[in-house]
Image: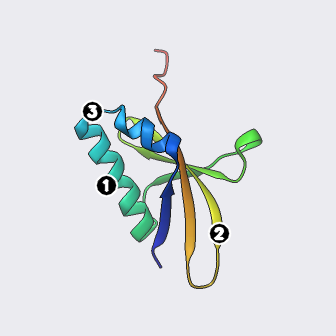
Amino acid sequence: MALSIEWTDEARADVRALDRSTAMQIFDGVYRYAVTGLGDVKALKGSHAGKLRLRVGGCRVFLSFSTRTERSSASSLSGIAPRPIADA
């Protein structure tokens, strides 16, 4: 079952601010997750409970489920952020 993804205005602005190759990586990663459910996905905790983080390249894509029925699922893509660089 494919997941229907709705891009929020904030997420659209985030992806427009990226360079073309990074934006295409984001589109490909979100599409792959929506169709297959595969990807580096983690359920978030605390104040972000109920959201998922999908890692795509050097970015994190934040998703939240808005509707889930037996026949379909919908998710809202709420934002894109760069992965933090770990201190060495």
Q: Which residue is mark 3?
A: 19
Mark 3 surroundings: few (<14), some (14-19) or many (≥20) residues within 10 A: few
Q: Please tell me which of labels 1 and 2 falls first in the chain.
A: 1
Question: Residue lying farthest left?
Answer: 21
Q: Please tell me which of labels 2 and 3 falls first in the chain.
A: 3
Q: Which residue is mark 1?
A: 28
Q: How many marks overall?
A: 3
**In the figure, is residue 46 to the left or right of 39?**
right
Q: Please tell me which of labels 1 and 3 falls first in the chain.
A: 3
Q: Which residue is mark 2?
A: 67
Q: Nearer the viewer, residue 82 or 85?
A: 82
Which residue: 36% across, 62% down?
A: 32
Which residue: 56% across, 61% down?
A: 75
Mark 1 surroundings: few (<14), some (14-19) or many (≥20) residues within 10 A: few
SS assignment at label 1: helix
**In the figure, is residue 75 to the left or right of 38?**
right
